[in-house]
Image (cartoon, rainbow, N blue to C red):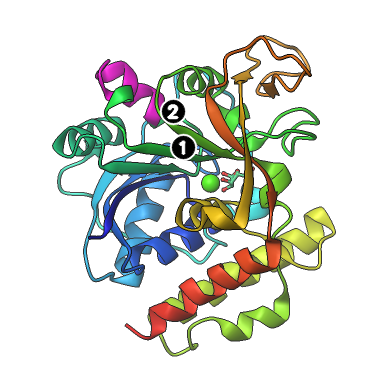
Amino acid sequence: MARKVILDVDPGIDDAVALAMALFDPRLEVIAVTATAGNVSAEQATSNVQAIIEKLDPPRLPRIGAAREPTGGRLADARHIHGNDGLGNIGVEVAELHQRHPSDKVIVEEVRAAPDAVTIVALGPLTNVARAMARDPELATMVGALHMMGGALGAGNVTPAAEFNIYCDPESAQAVFRSPTTKTLVPLDVTSRVVMTYDQLDQLPGELTATGTFMREILAFAFRSHRNVLGLEGIHLHDAVALVAALHPELFVTEELAGDVEIGGELSTGSTIFDRRPSPSWRPNMEVAVDVDASAVMDCILRGLSAIEMR
Ligand code: RIB
Ligand code: CA
């Protein structure tokens, strides 16, 4: 039986890649895709989720959750990496959602409809997950599993200390980290080890397919932005790596750690702190990926995308 998943995304080129993989993976039943602000505004994130689903036309249509701006948090600009529209400036046109249901409300409804059976894959700031837990205090114990792309054991990316998803809404991230939900965190240290190179574009679905055209358009922007902004000859697909961690945990090494989020520091706001002392006193609250078989994970991503063409 396919595994029920909710993808919480702030598309974002790497979110779009993860979403395409999940929507066509027969092992997964994507029951909802909930938009969150992060790489782009709440409005743009919601439009981008709609556009990706319309462009890819998956076998099963998920519910869509509409994003709302975080109350606290900080706007961290990711347009230099993902484009002004978040999808490589390809220009997405979507019709207004007939009935806009807030993302956190969709999460509560779908988890309550299948207690202990839903995996949430959070690939953006944790605003929606925290709001869903606040909306329904029992929710945290009803989620089957929560997989998060975010945080860093070492250096951040949006500041020296903080990774983007946590930095955008540290208060929500702290609430989620402190919740009793079964959590796995895939931090920047691990996701940055997986790099797609230009020659691997040939393994994507054919240019004549909707997916192939869409992927090539958004990834072309990513290759340019990673070269011009990060000086990289290749691209990171942080969110696709986090999705693979939920599908193939055997490709990762994890440690059970106690993790929390700095929300008050001048220089360290949004940093993730883990108690890795020889005799830790904090109570462990999540599994954290600390190592990865990077080439095997990239193979999974390429296979996941090329499988779309077969459908
Ligand atoms: O730091 C990487 C994360 O920030 C990814 O989820 C990317 O999409 C951005 O949201
Ligand atoms: Ca993301």
Mark 2: secondary structure: helix
Mark 1: secondary structure: loop
In the picture shown, does residue 67 fall above or below 200? above
Residue 127: which numbered mark, if any? 2
Kindly tell me whether residue 187 is visible in this rendering: yes
**Image-based side of 45 in relation to 116, left or right:** right
Percent across and percent down for residue 36 are: 42, 38
Name the dominant secondary structure of the magenta segment. helix
Quadrant location of the C terminus in the rendered image: bottom left
On the rendering, which quadrant does ligand 1 occupy? top right
Percent across and percent down for residue 258 are: 61, 21
The answer to whether mark 1 and mark 2 are in CB contact below 8 A is yes
Three-letter amino acid code of the residue under disc 2: Thr
In the picture shown, does residue 280 fall above or below 115? above
Percent across and percent down for residue 240 are: 54, 57
| Distance (Cα) linking label 1 and label 2 | 8 Å
Residue 133 within the magenta-colored segment of the rendering: yes
Three-letter amino acid code of the residue under disc 1: Ala
Mark 2, other Cα within 10 Å: few <14 / some 14–19 / many ≥20: many
**Image-based side of 281 in relation to 178, left or right:** right
Quarter of image, res 82: bottom right
Quarter of image, res 233: bottom right
Give the total number of marks visible in the rendering: 2
At x 37% / y 86%, what residue is drawn? Answer: 310
Is the CB atom of the residue marked by disc 2 within 8 angstroms of ligand 1's nearest atom?
no
Magenta range is 129-139
**Image-based side of 296 in relation to 111, left or right:** right
Mark closest to the chain's N terminus, 1 or 2: 1
Identify the residue position indicated by label 1 in the image. Answer: 37
